[in-house]
Amino acid sequence: MRSSVFITGATSGFGEACARRFAAAGWALVLTGRRAERLQALADELGAQTEVLALVLDVRDRDAMQQAIEQLPPAFNTLRGLINNAGLALGTTPAQQCSLDDWDTMVDTNIKGLLYSTRLLLPRLIAHGAGAGIVNLGSIAGNWPYPGSHVYGASKAFVRQFSLSLRCDLQGTGVRVTNLEPGLCESEFSQVRFAGDQARYDALYTGAQAIQPADIAETIFWLLNQPAHININSLELMPVSQSWSNFAIERAQGT
Ligand code: NDP
Ligand code: 8X3
């Protein structure tokens, strides 16, 4: 039987690249996202290579997630992989100027959406047993604060701690969990974060040689193909062009 993987947020960026990488290796795919046309186009394209099920889903919609997952066809009764990828950042303005709606959206997507897919799919991963694995998309923002990271960074810190905690409960099931923590990557992520401001997007990426979605897909493919007795707990990666900076110090005027 084919190995199968469930990917949230497969309509662009890392999720789409993962769909292509795993399809090329013959894995059966469940692809999800909100943008129906993109999702269907990808499913039609990859359907020539492998079994693909496209589910138009908003990860924040708990009832819809539950219904869709309960109705998965028998080919997905066991799952070898879950890639909890759907997520977003909104804005970089200081916390004191942010919209509570944006904060709600990040919490509902990055935290609650990830919890729904994890809890609802765990029985199918456990039914697969040894060799199964979850890859959660954390971020360097969950490890290192920077101005404007507030709720986005905090949501990814939640994902990191949840990933590590899950390992304790899954001990004995064979199911692995990895928190993947990328730094600067080039995708629609920053178009979403900057609300389509192309000048800000260009300023961030020009000359930076950012990590590309295909690089992340290759890393995730490697993670989910480790020998069954190995768990990579967390993996942080950055482009070579990115590193840490000094601490900010506010100085009193006139001293
Ligand atoms: P993209 O914006 O390219 O992709 C995000 C994906 O998430 C899209 O497929 C989008 O699909 C989906 N998505 C967003 N909200 C929802 C929702 N409510 N329900 C279902 N799907 C949703 O970004 P990336 O590929 O770069 O990001 C993927 C993940 O990686 C995110 O969790 C992000 O936080 C994380 N990450 C990104 C980094 C970067 O620099 N790019 C670095 C570190 C981590 P649709 O809009 O169709 O629903
Ligand atoms: C995205 C990476 O550095 O923009 O998670 O927060 S960063």
Image: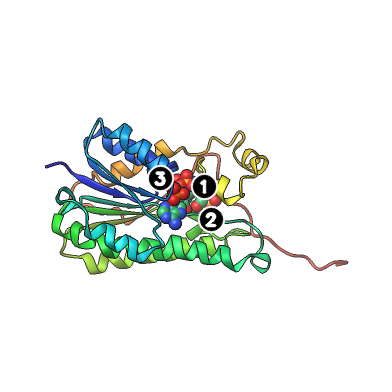
Residue labelled with disc 1: 189
Judge: label 2 CB < 8 Å from ligand 1: yes
Residue 149: x, y in percent? 57, 60
Of callouts 3 and 1, which one flags the residue occurring earlier in the amino acid sequence?
Answer: 3
In this picture the colour scheme is rainbow
Q: Are marks 2 and 1 in contact (CB under 8 Å)?
A: yes
Q: Can residue 183 be seen here?
A: no
Residue labelled with disc 3: 36
Of callouts 2 and 1, which one flags the residue occurring earlier in the amino acid sequence?
Answer: 2
Would you place residue 104 above or below residue 57 in this image? below
Badge 3 local density, few (<14 within 10 Å), some, or many (20+)? some
Of callouts 2 and 3, which one flags the residue occurring earlier in the amino acid sequence?
Answer: 3
Residue drawn where x is 58% and y is 37% of the image? 208
Classify the position of the C terminus by image quarter: bottom right
Judged from the image, the secondary structure of the residue bearing numbered disc 2 is: loop
Of labels 2 and 3, the one closer to you = 3
